Image (tube, helix red, strand yellow):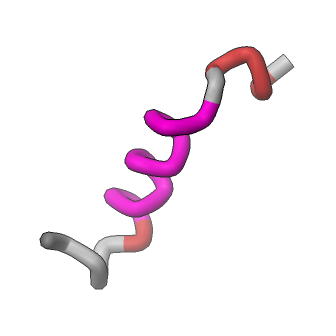
Amino acid sequence: MYRENPVLQDYLLVSCTPIEIDS
C-alpha cells in the first residue's frame, strides 16, 4: 500500500470518519 503517502492516508482516514465531523 501507499503508507508513505500522507495525503492518501488522510483520505482513507476521512473516508472512515463521518463527514458530519466537518460541521
What secondary structure do most residues of the magenta stretch adopt?
Answer: helix
Whether residue 8 sits left or right of residue 13 in the image: it is left
Asked if residue 12 is positioned above or below residue 20 in the image, the reply reads: below
Residue at the image position 33 percent from the left and 58 percent from the top? 8
Q: Residue at the location (19% across, 72% down)?
A: 2
The furthest residue to the left: 1
Image quadrant in which the N terminus is located: bottom left
Residue drawn at 49 percent across, 56 percent down: 10
- Residue 23 placement, left or right of 13: right
Q: Which of the image's four quarters has the C terminus?
A: top right
Residue farthest toward the bottom in the current orientation of the protein: 4
Measuring from the top left, give residue 16's x and y in whole percent: 49, 38
Residue 22 vertical position relative to residue 11 in the rendered view, above or below: above
**Could you say where residue 15 lies in the image, as x and y percent from the top left?**
45, 35
Q: Tell me which corner region of the image, top left, top right, bottom left or bottom right, holds residue 19.
A: top right
Residue 9, percent from left and from top: 40, 62
Span shown in magenta: 7-17
Q: Is residue 12 magenta?
A: yes
Q: Residue at x 42, y 47 (%)?
A: 11
Image position of 12 with respect to 2: above or below:
above
The answer to whether 19 appears left or right of 15 in the picture is right
In this rendering, the count of numbered labels is 0
